Amino acid sequence: MRILLVAALLLVAGCGSDEVVPSTPNDGKIRPPPSGERMMEDAACTALSDAHSKALLTVGCVGTSPACPSLLRAQQGGVACLEYDKGSLDGCIAHVNAQMTCDDLSTAITACIVYAYADSAPAGCP
C-alpha cells in the first residue's frame, strides 16, 4: 500500500512538468512551450479570443472575451505587432477549454501566456 502511495505521489509530482518553459518567472502563470511555428498577431489573438468565447458559451457563462489586439499585447507589456508561437497558443487554448466553471474561465484567459518572439516587431502586423 505504501509503495502505491509513493508511486502515485511521484506520478502527480511529474505531471505537467513539460507544460511550462523551464526558465520562466515564478509568477503563477502558465507558459506552454513554443513549437517554433510563428503566427501573426491578429491570427493568434483571434484564435485565443474565439476559443475563450466558445468556452464561455459551452460552460453557460455570461461574459465576453477581452478584445484583440489588446488581449495579447497586455501579456507583453503593450508591445504591438509581435509574432506569436502556434504551439504555445494551442497550449493556452487547451488550458481555456479545460476549464469547467465560469470563475475558472474568467481567470484562464489571462493566466496563460502565449509565447511571443521579442525580435519580431513589427513583423506581426500586416
Image (tube, helix red, strand yellow):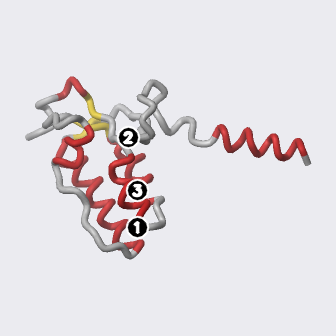
Determine which residue is flagged by label 1.
102
**Residue type indicated by callout 2:** Ser
Determine whether the residue tagged by mark 2 lies in a helix, strand or loop. helix
Determine which residue is flagged by label 2.
88
Which of the 4 quarters of the picture holds residue 86?
Answer: top left
Left or right? Give the position of 119 relative to 104: left
Image coordinates of residue 10 in percent, x first then y, are: 73, 38
**Residue type indicated by callout 3:** Val
Q: Nearer the viewer, residue 23 or 26?
A: 26
Left or right? Give the position of 3 relative to 78: right
Pointer 2: residues within 10 angstroms few (<14), some, or many (20+)?
many
Which residue appears farthest toward the right when viewing the image?
A: 1
Q: Nearer the viewer, residue 75 or 92?
A: 75
Counting residues from the N terminus, which is met first, the one under dot 2 or under dot 3?
2
Image coordinates of residue 9 in percent, x first then y, are: 74, 42
- At 33% from the left and 67% from the top, the residue drawn is 54
Determine whether the residue tagged by mark 1 lies in a helix, strand or loop. helix
Pointer 3: residues within 10 angstroms few (<14), some, or many (20+)?
many
- At 34% from the left and 53% from the top, the residue drawn is 109
**Residue type indicated by callout 1:** Cys
From the viewer's perspective, is the residue at label 1 or at label 3 nearer?
Answer: 1
**Distance between the alpha carbons at the discs numbered 2 and 1:** 23 Å
Callouts 1 and 3 close, C-beta under 8 Å = no
Which of the 4 quarters of the picture holds residue 103?
Answer: bottom left
Q: Which quarter of the rendering shows the C terminus?
A: top left
From the viewer's perspective, is the residue at label 2 or at label 1 nearer?
Answer: 1
Determine whether the residue tagged by mark 3 lies in a helix, strand or loop. helix
Counting residues from the N terminus, which is met first, the one under dot 2 or under dot 1?
2
**Distance between the alpha carbons at the discs numbered 1 and 3:** 11 Å
Determine which residue is flagged by label 3.
96
Image coordinates of residue 60 in percent, x first then y, are: 38, 76
